[in-house]
Amino acid sequence: MNIVEYNRNAWNLQSLDGCRWSTPVEDSVIERAKAGEWSLILTPNKPVPEDWYPSFPCLKGLDILALASGGGQQVPVMAAAGARVTSFDASDVQLDKDVETAEKHGLEITAEQGDMADLSRFDDESFDLIFHPVSNVFAAEVRPVWQECARVLRPGGRLLAGFMNPSFFLFDHYLAETTGELRVIHSLPYSDLDSMDRANLAEQMEAQLTVEFSHSLEDQIGGQCDAGLMVTALYEDGWDDASSALHKWTPIFVATRAVKPG
């Protein structure tokens, strides 16, 4: 199956339903960003530290690639802070929300639809910053994403990325949600296509829910290094009880700042 196309359709439906990651920010958030008061998240809760950005709070003069970051949230905020922002996402509905939110506030952005692992439409060294919140969980392979990010970053450019700790995928989350018991049932690396039983997978795909993949820390962090980037900072983040029972026991998300030498 074409994973990119399947997950594009699944995300379009999810975005139309208006999940947390598909709800555009309020007008007041954009107005505060224009005044220099803003923050963003790569993971569910913790704001990105201010010193992770090349400049803060003004992003004027920066070319930013918002990678798989559609939904009317981060993109218009960065544009309001002065950046030239390109939103690149597989979901056309998510991109539409970025465009509509930006236009509502008189902001200009560029919206491009495509696969996060294929940035071939962009020249080498096109961007000063890539903002990539948790989304490579929907990609079968993550190392090609890092290779492309390294290619399109300018020397000294930064990649800010959020991703899931692979340990999340070890557990039976339905059992945890219904009984509170945490039981390891999967081996890593995890893939919905290979790890779910056929009946549950068929039910999930009939409902057009996204297909997800775990990626090892070696691929998530080591992959950035192997692509030629230097990981210079890292933090962990949790979730909430409603989203995962595992939240009570361990951080579920990781965020990294990587810099392209030069």
Image (spheres, rainbow, N blue to C red):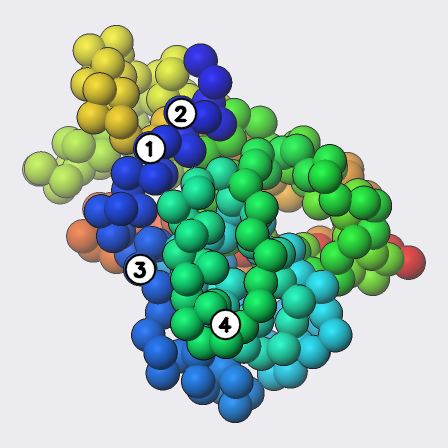
Residue at left offset 58%, top offset 27%: 141
Q: Pick whichever of labels 2 and 3 is earlier in the sequence.
A: 2
Tell whether 139 sits left or right of 131. left
- The residue that label 2 is drawn on is 6
- The residue that label 4 is drawn on is 77
Residue 232, placed above or below residue 88: below
Q: Nearer the viewer, residue 111 or 185?
A: 111
Pointers 2 and 3 in contact (C-beta within 8 Å): no
- The residue that label 3 is drawn on is 23
- Number of labelled discs? 4
Tell whether 192 sits left or right of 160. left
The amino acid on which the numbered mark 4 sits, given as a three-letter code, is: Val
Residue 224, placed above or below residue 202: below
Pointers 4 and 2 in contact (C-beta within 8 Å): no
Q: Residues within 10 Å of mark 4 (few under 14, many from 20)?
A: many
Distance between the alpha carbons at the discs numbered 4 and 2: 29 Å
Tell whether 194 sits left or right of 81. left
The amino acid on which the numbered mark 3 sits, given as a three-letter code, is: Thr
Distance between the alpha carbons at the discs numbered 3 and 1: 16 Å
Q: Pick whichever of labels 3 and 1 is earlier in the sequence.
A: 1
The amino acid on which the numbered mark 2 sits, given as a three-letter code, is: Tyr
Farthest residue, direction top: 198
Q: Pick whichever of labels 4 and 3 is earlier in the sequence.
A: 3
What secondary structure is found at the residue carrying circle 1?
helix
Residue 24, placed above or below residue 71: below
